[in-house]
Amino acid sequence: QVQLVESGGGLVHTGGSLSLSCIASGLTFSRSAMGWFRHAPGKEREFVGGILWSGGTQYSDSVKGRFTISRDNAKNTLYLQMNSLKPEDTAVYYCAAARIMRAVVVTTTVGYDYWGQGTQVTVSS
């Protein structure tokens, strides 16, 4: 049974930083394409960034230069370092995993098979 458990969300002021973690179990993490998505009230779930088994990354334009995705395969853990946070970054953040290896980052929800429960990030103005 695959489980993805996010942590690290919270409340931060504009310009602040937060670091999210996602611990994976039940899958071959080192081979899995991983991603972060977010869901804000009244909006669709949107791609934040993704990382391949090779370490290759891709980010949405809205977070590029501010957010960094990384992975520690020895710890089965995915990270999202968020800097220079803005009120529009407020959302529930989800960790996602693909069942298969990929050569390119998939930016849509249909490209991922497993999802965490989400962690709330709130950025106050």
Image (cartoon, rainbow, N blue to C red):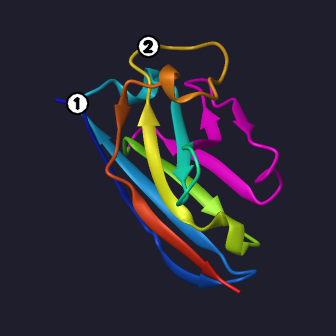
Quarter location, residue 14: bottom right
Residue type beneath disc 1: Gly
What residue is at 57 percent from the left and 55 percent from the top?
Answer: 80
Say left or right for 96 vs 53: left
- Secondary element at tag 1: loop
What residue is at 38 percent from the left and 18 percent from the top?
Answer: 99
> Which x, y percent locates residue 67?
71, 56
- Which residue range is magenta in the image? 46-74
Task: Give the Cα distance between marks 1 and 2.
Answer: 13 Å
- The numbered dot on residue 26 is 1
Q: In the picture shown, does residue 78 fall above or below 109? A: below
> Which x, y percent locates residue 60?
75, 42
Q: In the picture shown, does residue 61 fall above or below 40? A: above
Residue type beneath disc 2: Ile
What residue is at 69 percent from the left and 52 percent from the top?
Answer: 68
Say left or right for 105 vs 98: right
Q: In the picture shown, does residue 102 fall above or below 95? A: above
> Mark 1 vs mark 2: which is more N-terminal?
1
Say left or right for 55 vs 121: right
Q: In the picture shown, does residue 48 fall above or below 12? A: above
> Which x, y percent locates residue 104?
67, 17
- The numbered dot on residue 10 is none
For residue 50: magenta? yes
Q: How many marks?
A: 2
Q: Quadrant of the C terminus?
A: bottom right
Q: Crowding near pointer 2: few (<14 within 10 Å), some, many (20+)?
A: some
Q: Crowding near pointer 1: few (<14 within 10 Å), some, many (20+)?
A: few
What residue is at 76 percent from the left and 72 percent from the top?
Answer: 84
Q: Which residue is mark 2?
A: 100
